[in-house]
């Protein structure tokens, strides 16, 4: 069968049209759909960018508002006590009568925590004797004191030539949380001069107090002479068969065990991602805190923080060292430490290790700055990477945050 010239031309035109149609449907149409998807994704990214720019623009106003609120809280809390101890109340009660012809007897204390609040009440009940001028001056001193003191009860009996006698009841209200916002007043009793734990009463046993139980005397062997070959050699107690090195021995007291899971993650840059959770691998108790993070891209400085949320971690009296148990599966050039805010609002960054040169569990520790004003609050645990060669990802377990008090 012969194909005419006209038919050949038509077949060529048909082939060209088919090729163009195939190119359009299989080449151009998918690209147009991809362009539409990218345009929609771009619109979403631009909306997210606008939202972030709006948040960043309001950050200054938020910081200013926070500063104003903290100032208002500080002004309101100036008139209230922070942490109260019986020692401090005792010194205040007797200090108000300094230089007066007034004496006290039968002094008793009662302590009470108000349910549903952080308010602690300490009531001092006492019998007094003195004259009218001394009583009025004493009440004036309580009323003009920089912290609020409530005079709950005053009874007066006139003994004529013997002066006035009666009973006096004073109420002291303490809110430990206000110490983070107000300037602390000059305490009469401080941990610098009082080595006892201030959370205890003045008549309770202090730390390391040992009650000796009476024992039956051992029978004396009078047949064998006692020979002391080394009379000046001290005998050290052992723990697990290992002698204690007393010059470097630092017994620690736990201040936080990471059991409650009341922690959250914060990076020093918005693109630093991470989270905090509980882990059953621990040193003691039931859990440790697990912090995972991703610094995403290398920069000169990156930081991940485990922040204490609900319950503040407090150090109520002067301590020498702070320690933290850390678990890791690989070594890195990350530095680990804590950030502490003292009662004057000053921030201290305490570095506990410059790099992680271990695997598994290890306790890291560092001396606390002597300039810290107690009580102080441990705000967060930080992990930092410095330089562009820093490791960009990491996972650490934290447990047994503790401090070492001066050995008395």
Image (cartoon, rainbow, N blue to C red):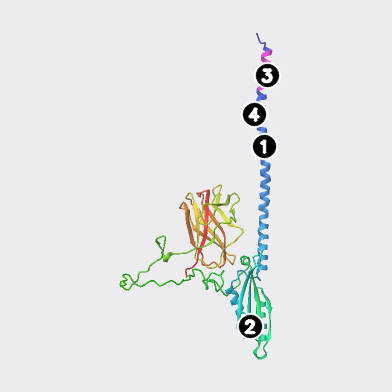
Q: Are marks 3 and 4 in contact (CB under 8 Å)?
A: no
> Would residue 9 be seen by someone viewing this image from the given angle?
yes
Magenta stretch encompasses residue 8: yes
Q: Residues within 10 Å of mark 2 (few under 14, many from 20)?
A: many
- What is the distance, in whole Å, between disc 1 and disc 4 at their CAs? 16 Å
- What is the distance, in whole Å, between disc 3 and disc 2 at their CAs? 120 Å
The disc, 2 or 4, on the residue closer to the chain's N-terminal end is 4
Q: Nearer the viewer, residue 53 or 348?
A: 348
**In the rendered image, which quarter contains the N terminus?**
top right
Viewer-nearest of discs 1 and 3? 1
Viewer-nearest of discs 2 and 4? 2
* Number of numbered tags placed on the structure image: 4
Q: Who's the residue at 67% across and 52% down the image?
A: 55
The disc, 1 or 3, on the residue closer to the chain's N-terminal end is 3
- In this picture, residue 361 sits left or right of residue 54: left
Label 3: which residue? Answer: 14
Give coordinates of residue 215: x percent, y percent. 43, 71
**At numbered mark 2, what does the secondary structure look like: helix, strand or loop?**
strand
- What is the distance, in whole Å, between disc 2 and disc 4 at their CAs? 102 Å
Give coordinates of residue 399: x percent, y percent. 52, 56
Q: From which residue to which does the magenta span run?
A: 6-18
Q: Identify the image quadrant of residue 256.
A: bottom right
Q: Residues within 10 Å of mark 1 (few under 14, many from 20)?
A: few
Give coordinates of residue 254: x percent, y percent. 52, 62
Q: What numbered label is drawn on residue 128?
A: 2
Give coordinates of residue 350: x percent, y percent. 52, 60
The disc, 1 or 2, on the residue closer to the chain's N-terminal end is 1
- In this picture, residue 277 sits left or right of residue 137: left
Label 1: which residue? Answer: 37
Magenta stretch encompasses residue 21: no
Label 4: which residue? Answer: 27
- What is the distance, in whole Å, between disc 3 and disc 4 at their CAs? 19 Å
């Amino acid at each position: 069968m012969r194909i005419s010239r006209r038919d050949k031309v038509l077949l060529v035109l048909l082939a060209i049209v088919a090729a163009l149609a195939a190119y359009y449907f299989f080449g151009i149409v998918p690209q147009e759909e991809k362009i539409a998807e990218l345009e929609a994704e771009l619109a979403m990214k631009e909306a997210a960018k606008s939202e972030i720019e709006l948040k960043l623009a309001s950050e200054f106003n938020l910081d200013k508002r926070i500063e104003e609120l903290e100032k208002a809280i500080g002004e309101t809390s100036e008139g209230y006590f922070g942490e109260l101890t019986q020692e401090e109340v005792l010194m205040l009660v007797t200090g108000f009568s300094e230089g007066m012809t007034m004496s006290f007897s039968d002094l008793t204390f009662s302590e009470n925590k108000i349910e549903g609040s952080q308010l602690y009440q300490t009531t001092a009940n006492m019998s007094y004797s003195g004259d009218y001028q001394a009583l009025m001056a004493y009440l004036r001193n309580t009323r003009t004191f920089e912290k609020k003191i409530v005079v709950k009860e005053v009874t007066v009996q006139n003994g004529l030539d013997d002066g006035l006698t009666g009973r006096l009841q004073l109420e002291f209200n303490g809110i430990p949380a206000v110490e983070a916002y107000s300037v602390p007043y000059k305490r009469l009793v401080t941990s610098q001069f009082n080595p006892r734990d201030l959370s205890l009463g003045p008549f309770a046993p202090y730390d390391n107090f040992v009650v000796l139980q009476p024992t039956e005397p051992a029978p004396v062997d009078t047949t064998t002479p006692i020979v002391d070959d080394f009379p000046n050699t001290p005998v050290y107690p052992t723990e697990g068969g290992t002698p204690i090195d007393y010059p470097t021995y630092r017994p620690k007291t736990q201040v936080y065990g990471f059991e409650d899971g009341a922690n959250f993650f914060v990076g020093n840059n918005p693109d630093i991602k991470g989270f905090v959770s509980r882990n059953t691998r621990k040193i003691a108790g039931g859990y440790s805190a697990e912090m995972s993070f991703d610094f995403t891209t290398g920069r000169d400085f990156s930081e991940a923080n485990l922040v204490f949320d609900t319950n503040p971690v407090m150090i109520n009296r002067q301590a020498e060292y702070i320690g933290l148990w850390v678990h890791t599966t690989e070594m890195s050039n990350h530095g680990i430490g804590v950030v502490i805010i003292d009662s004057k609002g000053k921030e201290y960054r305490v570095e506990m290790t410059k790099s992680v040169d271990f695997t598994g569990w290890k306790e890291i520790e560092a001396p606390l700055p002597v300039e810290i004003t107690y009580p102080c609050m441990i705000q967060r645990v930080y992990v930092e990477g410095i330089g562009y060669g820093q490791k960009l990802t990491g996972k650490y377990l934290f447990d047994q945050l503790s401090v070492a008090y001066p050995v008395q």
